[in-house]
Image: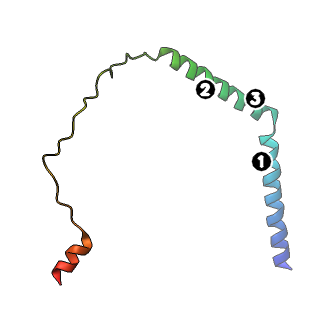
C-alpha cells in the first residue's frame, strides 16, 4: 500500500513538473524574450560584419614548381624476397 502511494506521489510530481515546464515554454513572455535575443544576436553579427576589414590577396605567384630529378634511384624492397633470403 505504501509503495503504491509513493509511486502515485512520484507520478504526480513529475506531471506537475512537465505541466509547469510546458506552460512556461509555450508562454508569450518566453516567446518574446527568445525572439528578442535572436534579433539582438543578428544585429550584433551585422554590426561586427560591417566593421571587419577586407584583406588584399597576397597569394599570387606563390607556388614554385620544382622538377623531379631521377638521379637518386631508390632500391625497391620486396617483403617476401627479404624473408626468402633469410632462410
- Answer above or below: position of 2 versus 32: below
For label 3, the residue is 32
Q: Element type at marker 2?
A: helix
Q: Which scheme is used to colour this image of the protein?
A: rainbow
- Residue at image point 32% right, 20% down: 60
Dot 3 or dot 1: first in sequence order is: 1
Q: Quadrant of the N terminus?
A: bottom right
- Answer above or below: position of 45 versus 27: above
- Residue at image point 81% right, 39% down: 26
As drawn, the residue found furthest toward the bottom would be 87
Q: Picture coordinates of residue 49 (x, y %)?
A: 52, 19
Q: Nearer the viewer, residue 81 or 63?
A: 81
Select label 1 or label 2 by which is in front. 2
Q: Which mark is residue 21?
A: 1
Image quadrant where residue 25 sits? top right
Q: Picture coordinates of residue 38 (x, y %)?
A: 66, 28
Select label 2 or label 3 by which is in front. 2
- Answer above or below: position of 48 versus 85: above
Q: Is residue 47 left or right of residue 71?
A: right
Q: Element type at marker 1?
A: helix
- Residue at image point 80% right, 48% down: 20
Dot 2 or dot 3: first in sequence order is: 3
Q: Picture coordinates of residue 76 (x, y %)?
A: 21, 61
Q: Which mark is residue 41?
A: 2
- Residue at image point 57% right, 19% down: 46
Q: Residues within 10 Å of mark 2 (few under 14, many from 20)?
A: few
Q: Residues within 10 Å of mark 3 (few under 14, many from 20)?
A: few
Looking at the image, do the residues carrying marks 1 and 2 touch, with CB atoms under 8 Å apart?
no
Dot 1 or dot 2: first in sequence order is: 1
Alpha carbons under labels 1 and 2: distance apart: 25 Å
Q: Nearer the viewer, residue 59 or 51?
A: 59
Image quadrant where residue 87 sits? bottom left
Amino acid at each position: 500500500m505504501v509503495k503504491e502511494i509513493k509511486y502515485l506521489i512520484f507520478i504526480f510530481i513529475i506531471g506537475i513538473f512537465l505541466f509547469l515546464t510546458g506552460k512556461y515554454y509555450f508562454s508569450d513572455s518566453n516567446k518574446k524574450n527568445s525572439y528578442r535575443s535572436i534579433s539582438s544576436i543578428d544585429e550584433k553579427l551585422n554590426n561586427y560584419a560591417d566593421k571587419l576589414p577586407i584583406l588584399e590577396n597576397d597569394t599570387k605567384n606563390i607556388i614554385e614548381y620544382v622538377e623531379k630529378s631521377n638521379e637518386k634511384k631508390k632500391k625497391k624492397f620486396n617483403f617476401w624476397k627479404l624473408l626468402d633470403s633469410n632462410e
